[in-house]
Amino acid sequence: MKTIFAGLSALGLALTGAAALSTPAAAQGEYRQKISNDMRKCAPGKGPAVRVTVSGIKSATGKVRVQLYRGTKAEWLAKGRWLNRIEVPARKGNMTFCVPVPASGSYAIAARHDANGNGETDIRQDGGAMSRNPSINIFNLGKPSVSKTRFNAGAGVSSIAIQMKYFS
């Protein structure tokens, strides 16, 4: 339980901390793009994009947020360094997202279920997930190394599946 608690806490802080920054849009450049979940961008022949299936969502309350990061140590879960964010009302079970990527390359995904929709990390309610489903424990405080979360996206549409984890 403590391992999941620490992991969700760090993931929640990273995802909410990124949202709290107030950098002007012009200075953001390619970072911090809030986009819709447009599944047409993951249709055959489209891309580059990643189709992300998030499983294990406990409830249809609150919101699910998916953020794309470059697959580098310097950018993985760094405040304000996410490239694209999709945030939608939660659905219990599985949800699928289409996350465009700037170009073929190495990326990592972080997802969060803000179960009560308050925009804060509530460890006993909220869930968290990361690409490649790394182990989250007290020693890495919920921020597994980028080598455990990054994946390669090609010119087309790549697909990944991640599992939402909860404290209880």
Image (cartoon, rainbow, N blue to C red):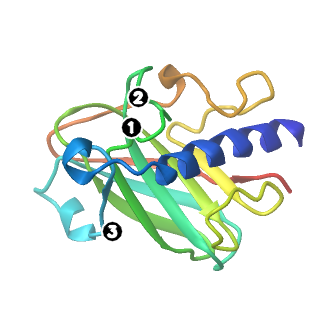
Residue, x 66% and y 79% (percent of image)? 61
Q: Which residue is mark 3?
A: 37
**In the image, residue 98 above or below residue 134:** below
Q: Please report contact status of discs 1 and 2: CB closer than 8 Å, yes or no.
A: yes
Q: CA distance from mark 1 to mark 2?
A: 6 Å
Give, as a three-letter code, the residue at label 1: Arg
Give, as a three-letter code, the residue at label 2: Glu
Dot 3 alpha-carbon crowd within 10 angstroms: few under 14, some 14 to 19, many 20 or more: some
**In the image, residue 58 above or below residue 120:** below
Label 2 vs 3, first from the N-terminus: 3
Using residue 35 as the reference point, say whether residue 40 is left or right of it.
left
Tell me residue 22's x, y (percent).
Answer: 40, 51
Label 1 vs 3, first from the N-terminus: 3
Label drawn at residue 81: 1
> Can residue 30 be seen at all in this image of the molecule?
no
Q: Please report contact status of discs 1 and 3: CB closer than 8 Å, yes or no.
A: no
Give, as a three-letter code, the residue at label 3: Asn
Q: CA distance from mark 2 to mark 3?
A: 23 Å
Q: Split into 4 quadrants, where in the image is the N terminus?
A: top right
Q: Split into 4 quadrants, where in the image is the C terminus?
A: bottom right
Dot 2 alpha-carbon crowd within 10 angstroms: few under 14, some 14 to 19, many 20 or more: some
Most extreme residue toward the right, as rendered?
1
Using residue 50 as the reference point, say whether residue 44 is left or right of it.
left
Label drawn at residue 75: 2
Q: Of discs 2 and 3, which sits in the foreground?
A: 2
- Residue 135 placement: quadrant: top right
- Residue 152 placement: quadrant: top left
Query: SS for tag 2?
Result: loop
Tell me residue 13's x, y (percent).
Answer: 63, 45
Dot 1 alpha-carbon crowd within 10 angstroms: few under 14, some 14 to 19, many 20 or more: some
- Residue 109 placement: quadrant: top left
